[in-house]
Image: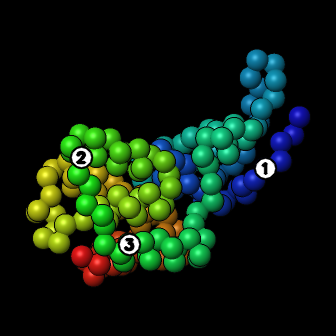
């Protein structure tokens, strides 16, 4: 049984728990006597190759990179002040990890806004810096692929936008 393929070989895709990767091939593998098709996604940064059943790709959260309209929404969100959260750090930390692993670029933007400190990274705790950095890397990687621009330039643009909003 052939499943309609939603993603093209060579395209960049986002897998929630790993970020941006490139779809390198679609392999057919026999599993328990049944032929199944798998997307093979390469995540360069982690040197990780993932095989994801084509049938389960959408349910697993696989998606294309952001559109121009979504990029505008992300930067609009980043340019607004963050709402202060009044909960214990352990709860917020779990919430941030969930947002980062959701693969949702707007959730990444929210996380960055909430963790961005006007005094710079020296004003953050070690765990805040780690979570902030992870969210920044994920969002910047996706935007740089979507815009076909340098990762470093995108990272600076995100941080400048956050600084101006603070």
The numbered dot on residue 87 is: 2
Local secondary structure at mark 1: loop
Figure check: 112 above or below 151: above
Residue holding disc 1: 5
In which quadrant is the C terminus drawn?
bottom left
Of the numbered discs 1 and 3, the one sitting upstream in the chain is 1
Pick whichever of labels 2 and 3 is earlier in the sequence. 3
Between tags 2 and 3, which lies in front?
Answer: 2
Disc 2 versus disc 3: distance between alpha carbons? 22 Å
The residue shown at (77%, 32%) is 36
What x and y, as percent, mark residue 121?
A: 16, 64
Q: Which residue is mark 3?
A: 78
Give the x, y percent position of residue 104.
50, 55
Expressed as whole percent of the image width and height from the top left, the position of residue 152 reads 35, 73
Mark in the foreground, 1 or 3 = 3
Can residue 156 be seen by looking at this rendering? no
Task: Confirm whether residue 165 shows in the render.
Answer: yes
The residue under the point 15% across, 50% down is 126
Mark toward the start of the polypeptide (1 vs 2): 1
Q: State the SS at label 3.
A: helix
Give the class, few, some or many, for how many residues have Cα within 10 Å of label 1's Cα (few <14, many ≥20). few
Q: Quadrant of the N terminus?
A: top right
Who is closer to the viewer here, 104 or 29?
Answer: 104
Q: Nearer the viewer, mark 1 or mark 2?
A: 2
Decide which of 73, 61 is in the foreground and name it. 73
Q: Is residue 9 found left or right of 163 in the rendered image?
A: right
In front of the other: 85 or 49: 85
Q: Looking at the picture, does residue 149 appear above or below residue 44?
A: below
């Amino acid at each position: 049984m052939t499943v309609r393929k939603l993603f093209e070989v060579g395209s960049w895709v986002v897998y929630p728990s790993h970020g941006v990767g490139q779809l390198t091939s679609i392999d057919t593998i026999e599993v328990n006597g049944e032929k199944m098709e798998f997307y093979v996604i390469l995540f360069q940064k982690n040197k990780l190759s993932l095989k994801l059943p084509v049938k389960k790709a959408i349910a697993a959260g696989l998606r294309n990179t952001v559109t121009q309209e979504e990029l505008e929404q992300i930067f609009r969100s980043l340019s607004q002040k963050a709402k202060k959260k009044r909960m214990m750090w352990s709860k917020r930390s779990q919430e941030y990890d969930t947002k980062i692993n959701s693969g949702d670029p707007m959730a990444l933007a929210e996380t960055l806004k909430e963790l961005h400190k006007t005094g710079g990274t020296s004003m953050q705790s070690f765990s805040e810096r780690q979570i902030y950095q992870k969210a920044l890397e994920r969002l910047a990687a996706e935007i740089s692929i979507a815009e076909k621009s340098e990762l470093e330039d995108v990272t600076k643009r995100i941080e400048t936008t956050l600084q101006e909003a603070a």
